[in-house]
Image (cartoon, grey):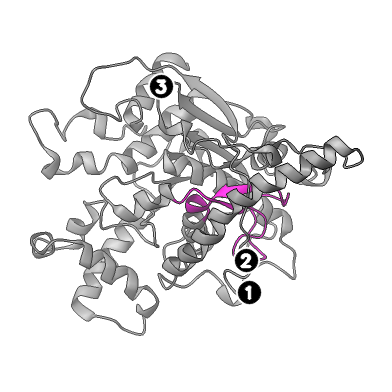
């Protein structure tokens, strides 16, 4: 890969005393994902002869002795309250930056649904209306208890199938460069060959940096202490965003100095560990290698995938000869010819991104302000298109094994509650 990862490994963001997979962690973190990703299943309107919203499948089973079941922060609740306030006040100086978001949420609701909104709880109850940013993201912050006292967990929502912005995020899979993404200060990798699924990268950028609902704003406001264990967890789309969030925090803390610290992470030294469940491939092989260089020694990036779940198998890996470049020296005629042919394939792959990415950037605009945006530089100035579609999982992948079923539920193998059951059965 034509680079030395030694410098990256000199900064440690993992806790070597808390290495590797632990069932007690995985079994609780999947419950945070059930809370987020099964919200639509719990809606009374989802009741059918074959679907019971009161089923234990759809409700989180958080152990109150280990984690406070009530989140320290719930972005869904804050968005719902602000939407209801916007309905009564309209655009004001206070909410101006997020007026586009509120109008879009209100416009997405049908007349009957809007008429039924009597309080913020009615907006909160429907995942179509309680997200933020261009892809309607949501996240929770949990606080540990007893042996987890002093620990915090960020839980990131996966795809909301009833929300077109969330589904669009999955579809925008053309690659973008992970280093200095949209801003010179935002990096998900240090190697310029590392590229990411564009939709996941853009959604993670907003999830982190939104100045009202974003992770950085909340961690700053809540004054999460130095050296706190910080878990990052997610299911499905949220699992890939978990991986990117883990990578972002590593590099943001590593690069923070006393004179350059736009994210207010200098000296924080959070002890990072992530669990991703049903992870779609977040980036290319080079990103996976870069992510491994910062996580595998501490074994602090666990990915659990079901072998017959289709979601971890996308996006499809479409290699060209450019992905086989490796460390081939350009000194012989066959290798020079190889590089020439490889450049053609890479150029064609890159063309898709050059066409699509400007539309993505424009559609992302005006959903809110960014955390300390005056220190970030021009947003979008550092956005570079990748050419590698060599998508691969990132993190230490562990497999559970589903049982084929003739159910009419096409995503039976993918649900967070299905992963709950498989982890309990197969990963004690």
Which of the 4 quarters of the picture holds residue 380?
bottom right
Nearest to the observer: residue 360 or residue 263 = 360
Which of the 4 quarters of the picture holds residue 131?
bottom left
Alpha carbons under labels 2 and 3: distance apart: 38 Å
Instruction: Report if residue 173 is visible in the image.
Output: yes
Dot placed on the residue nearer the N-terminal end, 1 or 2: 2
Residue carrying label 3: 308
Q: Is residue 42 above or below residue 21?
A: below
Q: Position of residue 204 (x, y in %)?
A: 50, 54
Which of the 4 quarters of the picture holds residue 92?
bottom left
Question: How many residues crowd mark 1 within 10 Å: few (<14), some (14–19), many (20+)?
Answer: some
Drawn side of residue 80 relative to residue 327, left or right? left
Residue carrying label 1: 377
Mark 1 in CB contact with mark 3 (< 8 angstroms): no
Mark 1 in CB contact with mark 2 (< 8 angstroms): yes
Q: Is residue 183 above or below residue 37?
A: below
Nearest to the observer: residue 300 or residue 185 = 185
Drawn side of residue 40 relative to residue 151, left or right? left
Q: Position of residue 73 (x, y in %)?
A: 39, 55
Query: Magenta segment, which residues?
Result: 172-201
- Residue 183, numbered circle: 2
The chief SS type of the magenta part is loop
- Identity of the residue drawn at 51% across and 33% down: 147
Question: How many residues crowd mark 3 within 10 Å: few (<14), some (14–19), many (20+)?
Answer: some
Location of the N terminus (image quadrant): top right
Alpha carbons under labels 1 and 3: distance apart: 44 Å
């Amino acid at each position: 890969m034509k680079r030395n990862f030694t410098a990256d490994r000199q900064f440690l963001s993992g806790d070597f005393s808390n290495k590797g997979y632990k069932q007690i962690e995985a079994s609780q973190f999947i419950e945070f994902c059930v809370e987020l990703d099964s919200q639509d299943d719990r809606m009374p309107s989802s009741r059918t002869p074959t679907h019971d919203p009161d089923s234990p499948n759809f409700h989180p089973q958080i152990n109150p002795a280990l984690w406070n079941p009530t989140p320290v922060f719930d972005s869904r609740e804050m968005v719902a309250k602000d939407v209801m306030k916007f309905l009564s006040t309209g655009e004001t100086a206070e909410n101006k930056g997020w007026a586009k978001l509120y109008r879009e949420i209100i416009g997405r609701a049908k007349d009957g649904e809007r008429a039924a909104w009597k309080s913020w709880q009615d907006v909160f109850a429907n995942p179509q209306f309680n997200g933020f940013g261009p892809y309607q993201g949501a996240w929770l912050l949990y606080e540990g208890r007893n042996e987890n006292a002093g620990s915090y967990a960020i839980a990131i929502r996966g795809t909301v199938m009833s929300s077109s912005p969330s589904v669009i995020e999955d579809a925008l899979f053309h690659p973008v460069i992970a280093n200095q993404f949209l801003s010179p200060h935002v990096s998900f990798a240090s190697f310029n060959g590392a590229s990411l699924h564009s939709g996941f990268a853009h959604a993670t950028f907003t999830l982190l940096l939104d100045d009202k609902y974003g992770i950085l704003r909340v961690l700053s406001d809540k004054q999460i202490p130095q050296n706190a264990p910080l878990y990052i967890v997610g299911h499905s789309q949220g699992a890939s965003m978990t991986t990117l969030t883990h990578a972002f925090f590593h590099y943001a803390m590593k690069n923070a100095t006393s004179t350059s610290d736009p994210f207010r992470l200098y000296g924080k030294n959070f002890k990072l560990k992530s669990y991703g469940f049903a992870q779609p491939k977040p980036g290319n092989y080079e990103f996976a290698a870069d992510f491994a260089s910062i996580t595998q020694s501490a074994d602090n990036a666990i990915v659990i995938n079901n072998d017959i779940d289709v979601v971890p198998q996308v996006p499809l890996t479409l290699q060209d000869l450019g992905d086989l470049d490796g460390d081939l020296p350009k000194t012989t005629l066959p290798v020079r010819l190889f590089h020439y042919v490889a450049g053609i394939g890479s150029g064609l792959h890159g063309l898709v991104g050059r066409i699509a990415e400007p539309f993505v950037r424009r559609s992302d605009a005006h959903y809110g302000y960014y955390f300390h945006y005056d220190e970030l530089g021009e947003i979008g100035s550092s956005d570079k298109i990748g050419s590698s579609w060599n998508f691969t999982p990132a993190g230490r992948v562990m497999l559970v094994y589903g049982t084929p079923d003739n159910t009419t539920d096409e995503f039976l193998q993918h649900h967070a509650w299905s992963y709950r059951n498989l982890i309990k059965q197969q990963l004690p």
